[in-house]
Amino acid sequence: MAMDSVLLEDEKREAEKVREEQRRINEQFLSDVRATFNTPHGKRIFTFLLDQGGVNASLFSREHDMCRNVAVHDFVIENVLAPVISADEEIYLSIIRERAEKLRKEEGERK
């Protein structure tokens, strides 16, 4: 019985070490995201990635393209956009605001 409790304690310590290391890696990643995407060039890269992933585009097109569009869109949302939003949602919101302002300006110039 004593041996079981020693093994259990060792497993608990090891699990805590793993959780702590994962927490450290996540915090470092979030810090890197904030530092990168809060810069003008970081925002341009981020916007490019979102555009390439079709985040703001229609998913509906020719039938054979639709599955690809949805797959790429979902991948970008889950693996690019979600981590950035979890780091700092203001980054994404500022990009959306800038895009909306640009569209309004272009619309005004056409009139």
Image (cartoon, rainbow, N blue to C red):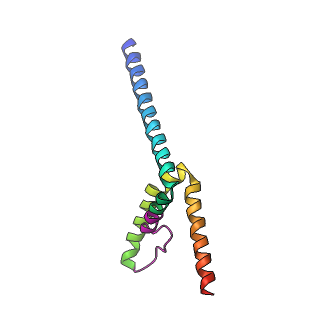
With 41 as the anchor, is 100 left or right in this view? right
Q: Position of residue 5 (x, y in %)?
A: 41, 17
Q: Nearer the viewer, residue 62 or 83?
A: 83
Look at 45% across and 57% down and name the residue there: 80
Image quadrant occupied by the N terminus: top left
**What secondary structure is the magenta-colored segment mainly?**
loop
Q: Nearer the viewer, residue 84 or 61?
A: 84
User: Which quadrant holds residue 108?
Assistant: bottom right
Q: How many marks?
A: 0
Image quadrant occupied by the C terminus: bottom right
Q: Residue lying farthest front?
A: 40
**Magenta span of residues:** 47-62
Look at 44% across and 65% down and name the residue there: 48
* Figure check: 33 above or below 18: below
With 54 as the anchor, is 85 left or right in this view? right
Q: Residue lying farthest bottom?
A: 111
* Figure check: 48 above or below 106: above
Q: Position of residue 24 (x, y in %)?
A: 46, 36
Q: Nearer the viewer, residue 72 or 51?
A: 51
Look at 42% across and 20% down and name the residue there: 9
Q: Is residue 52 magenta?
A: yes
Q: Position of residue 95 (x, y in %)?
A: 55, 63
User: Which quadrant holds residue 94?
Assistant: bottom right
* Figure check: 62 above or below 18: below
Q: Position of residue 89 (x, y in %)?
A: 57, 54
Look at 47% across and 37% down and name the residue there: 23
Q: Is residue 82 magenta?
A: no
